[in-house]
Image (cartoon, rainbow, N blue to C red):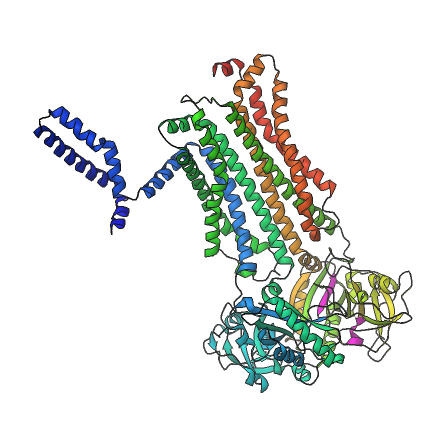
Amino acid sequence: MAWTTRLMNLLRRNDLDAEIDEELRFHLDARARDNVAAGMTDEEAQRDAIRRFGGPLQAREASRDADIIAWIETIAQDIRYAARSLRKSPGVTSIAVLSLGLAIGASTAILSFVNAVLLRSLPYKDAGRIAMLWTSNALNGAMEQNTSPLNMEDWRTGSHTFEDLAAYRESDGPLMEPGGASSETEWIGFAWVTGNFFHLLGRNPLLGRVFGADEVANRSRVIVLSHGLWQRRLGGSADVIGRVLRVSGQDVHVIGVMPDDFWFPSKEIQLWAPGSLNPVWQKAQGDRSTRFGAVFGRLKPEATLARARGDMRIIAERLERQYPDANANLGVNVVPLQAQISGKSVPYMLMILFGAVLFVLLIACANVANLLLARAVVRRREIAIRTALGAGRRRIVRQLLTESVLLSCMAGCLGLLLVAWTTRTLTTFAPKNIVRLDEVHIDVSVLLFTLVLSAGTGVLFGLAPAIRVSREGGSVSLDGKNRNSAGMQSAQTMRAAFVVCQFALAVVLLSGAGLLIRSLLAIRSVDAGFGDRNVVTAHLRFDNTLARPRRVALYKEAIERLSRLPGTRAVGAVSTMFWNNDGGKFGVRAVEGQAPQSRDQWSALTWTSISGDYFQALAVPLVRGRFFLDRDRQDSPPVVLINETMSRRYWPGQDPIGKRIKGFDARGRNDEWVTVVGLVKDVHSRGLDRPPMAQIFETQLQSLDETENLVVSTAATSGVAEAVRRTIRELDRSAVLSDVSTLDGRLSELGAQRRFQTYLLSIFAALALALAGAGIFGMMHYSVVQRTQEIGIRMALGAQRANVLNMVFREGLALTLVGVVLGAAGSLALTRSISSLLFGVTPGDPVTFGAVSATLAAIALAGCYLPARRATRVDPLAALRSD
């Protein structure tokens, strides 16, 4: 109760002061009356009463301290004084708030990305205990292959570290409502899953229920919808349970809807169906070599990832001995679910960007510290007066730290305003392949980070100036003259050190940005291998319930109809146009006349099916031999085309035409020799920054693989997309045409992540450059102000304006040179960490470092110009009279 009363008294300070004054008068009067009664005069009685109470002012302060929480009032006084002090220097305050606000805003925005993509828990029960279990292949180096259900059961029963295992198989197909219009057909991604799928993830449905092991065993035709599909396709109807949908040709009943935040294994999966409805599942029950899908499991509470990997290695070795035909060279690759979902490149990119904004923050802190230290020069008289009145060093340091923390909190508020805009902008321009990108937002943890960051930066940049100023308090006379030249020189040295640190950090950021910019320019100069860029691409899929020959015929008919469109030069299609990895990993089993192939010759090799005039549409040159002809059909000898990389790998310096190979292609063609009839130029199908991979091309007429990716070469791309849609709709109204784009657009998508990180790092580097320029300007400006008398004496003794100008420039460039040297040494060490992002340049590229050094020198000269010009205009007589 007493504590509450003292706290409330802080809010009624005027009333409390009046009450204390009245009580003091009462006690003084009572004591004076007693003194008069004891024989003293009135004057003696008053003096004795005041003496006994220690003086009215001291008594009043003691009474107030007993009635309030003194330390809270002291802090409030410090804050009010700090606010008045900052208002007296609007220029310094504005520059400090702006520079810190930009740095804090950038740091918080990047943290929002890091938090959403890497730190925020996945929407599953005890997500940290869930791991992926992939089949690895020691023969071809593949680390993430599907697993057979029989192997998964042996993993489950033999494991001592996993509570349970479940499996899923990603697929896609048409979704429609039976009896609905064919125009309502939608192509969606979905997953075939085992009966314990939802139980292992530990999530309950929003509506209805999920299916279990019994329904999977009985092949029940049921599905569970994602929240997004339920809202988009079915309008969020509450009576969705029991509704019949047709998924990939099968009529199934909806039994549940998952919550809005649930997704697995990716957000492209729109529904989940029993794995037993998939023909591959049925085949795999009696064939261990038939692989169904991916496996994930939940670790036991006491199990570690290292123990799990050792456990699964023992099981894999046992299965290889028991079933050598199906499990030869196969192991188990255990990966934490969080690492599996976020991948390798995204965390690497975000950590680089987060490190960059921390560098910007440090530069901003050094800049503000320099401003505050320089501002303290004009506050020497104030500090001297406070010291003379009894303020100790701790009290002065606390007051100055309060000012710096208030300054940083103001910057933090500005940073939060910038974060909302910056986060939306970054989300818009970020690569779309970043998982959980849609979850980026400002939450409580981000707000707390901003609060801590603001307070922490206030202490960081305010501590050194506060300590320095408090030390000089006693060495400054009340007229503001410093009697301690060593202290002045020490402060000057500290400001110079701040400038050197700013330039060193700026060099590191500029070097990294410069290397990435040069890499981006080098990539853009790479010949993609496509001679014609006026090409429209699209993804075409027909109803997968149709027989494969019928779908192949539809693709052939689509190409023929598109070829008749006005302005069309050539039309073709391919099974896979661009790859995000090393290809199909299928390799070559044998080459006629050569020894068996080594493991290295298996990697980065893929078999691809094409139809129509695919190479002609893209203007990919035929180096030797011929293209596919109409006579290359199912009943004729199998032939293939290869690219230059494939030719160099297997027939270096030879003509590959007429050579024969036997390979593991996507359909497991193990015992059939195929003849090379054509050699085409390499194309960069994995992106311009990666070398072409070895490719073997089959004709769709022989492989019967579906060529889903259309390429249409036209005189002009405008209006072609709508013509393609209309033609496909006329051919088959149930067909789904998606991802309509231009070839340049597709190539741009492959380099989106590199461009994103390059542009962001360049923005941070430009911000660091601006802050460093402001730092050198502030340093030289205050240096000239402090040395006005010295400059006046020099000029009075005969120094020319050119000599003064050179002196100022020499001092600024010396600081710049030291900063550049230190920064270059740091850059040589740190830029090696981004060597995997570089293309066409080395981490120690001399051109980049030379350009960075020249840029910083130019900024330093610009920052020194105005202070140097001011120094040349010093009036010697006025400077001498100023002492």
> Residue 55 falls in which quadrant of the image?
top left
In the picture, measured across the screen, residue 185 lies left or right of residue 529, that is left
* Residue drawn at (66%, 71%) of the image: 134
Q: Which residue lies furthest to the front in this view?
A: 38
Task: Report if residue 772 lies within the magenta region.
Answer: no
The residue nearer to you, when weighing 11 against 68, is 68
* Residue drawn at (54%, 22%) of the image: 787
Q: Position of residue 527 (x, y in %)?
A: 78, 54
> Residue 313 falls in which quadrant of the image?
bottom right
Q: Where is residue 394 in the image (x, y as percent from the top left)?
A: 41, 36
* Residue drawn at (50%, 78%) of the image: 256
> Residue 22 falls in which quadrant of the image?
top left
Say if 750 sits above or below 807 in the image.
below
Say if 506 sits above or below 882 in the image.
below
Q: Does residue 12 show up?
A: no
* Residue drawn at (66%, 81%) of the image: 150
Q: Position of residue 331 (x, y in %)?
A: 70, 72
Q: Residue furthest bottom?
A: 218
Q: Position of residue 753 (x, y in %)?
A: 65, 55
Give the total number of marks visible in the rendering: 0
Region in magenta: 698-717
Task: Report if residue 703 lies within the magenta region.
Answer: yes
In the picture, measured across the screen, residue 404 lies left or right of residue 750, that is left
Say if 83 sits above or below 622 in the image.
above
Say if 511 sits above or below 756 in the image.
above
